[in-house]
């Protein structure tokens, strides 16, 4: 299966989850999620788990930074310290999983660094990026 096909499947499968996360972003911020589709499953699971604890939590930003997932959020008013700690653990777990997941296709991946980029990719997506270094893999 081609990378484009994998990405299409991931985007379709997790479209509602990604839209739900976008809806949690404050209207004054950009409603964009800056990660590749390979991490959409991680985002969906994270959003689901956080929503169970705090249905009104807000998302500040979701992005890739230095090859890792960053999921910035804020709990709603009145959420207990215990629940806030659980929420933090959920996000930390998601960020750990992302370090081992290709951001582009969702297969097992690892951190790769070169002179222009730091990404968590599988070997196949890394070779695609190496073949076309002037193009972003997304």
Image (cartoon, rainbow, N blue to C red):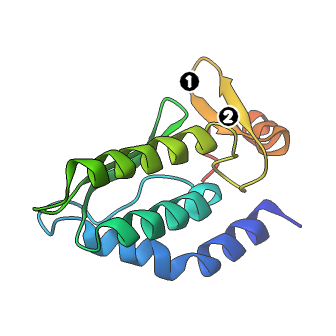
Tell me whether the residue at label 2 lies in contact with that at label 1, contact meaning CB atoms closer than 8 angstroms: yes
| Residue designated by label 2 | 133
Between 56 and 64, which is closer to the camera in this rendering?
A: 56
Report the disc number at residue 3.
Answer: none
Element under disc 1: loop
Identify the residue at image location x=10%, y=62%.
77
Measuring from the top left, give residue 62's x and y in whole percent. Answer: 38, 52
Residue at horizontal 69 percent and vertical 45 percent from the top: 101
Of residues 56 and 82, the one nearer the viewer is: 82
* Residue 131 point in image, percent of width and height: 79, 37
Q: Where does the image place residue 19, in percent across and percent down from the top left?
A: 40, 77
Horizontal and vertical percent for residue 12? Answer: 62, 80
Residue drawn 60% across and 17% down?
Answer: 115
Against 112, residue 47 (above or below) is: below
Calculate the distance from the C-alpha at mark 2 to the C-alpha at mark 1.
9 Å
Question: Which of the 4 image quadrants contains residue 50?
Answer: bottom left
- Tag 2 secondary structure: loop
- Label 1 sits on residue: 116
Residue at 84% x, 64% y is 2
Q: Earlier in the sequence, mark 2 or mark 1?
A: 1
Occupied quadrant, residue 24: bottom left
Image quarter of the N terminus: bottom right
Q: Quadrant of the C terminus?
A: bottom right
Q: Is residue 47 visible?
A: yes
């Amino acid at each position: 299966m081609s990378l484009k096909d994998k990405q299409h499947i991931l985007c379709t499968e997790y479209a509602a989850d990604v839209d739900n996360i976008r809806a949690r972003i404050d209207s004054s911020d950009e409603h964009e999620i800056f990660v590749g589709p390979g991490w959409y499953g991680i985002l969906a699971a994270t959003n689901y788990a956080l929503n169970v604890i705090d249905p009104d939590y807000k998302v500040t930003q979701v992005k890739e930074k230095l090859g890792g997932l960053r999921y910035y959020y804020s709990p709603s008013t009145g959420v207990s310290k215990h629940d806030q700690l659980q929420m933090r653990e959920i996000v930390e777990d998601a960020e750990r999983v992302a370090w081992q997941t290709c951001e582009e296709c969702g297969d097992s991946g690892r951190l790769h660094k070169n002179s222009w980029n730091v990404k968590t990719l599988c070997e196949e997506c890394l070779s695609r990026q190496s073949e076309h270094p002037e193009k972003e893999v997304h």
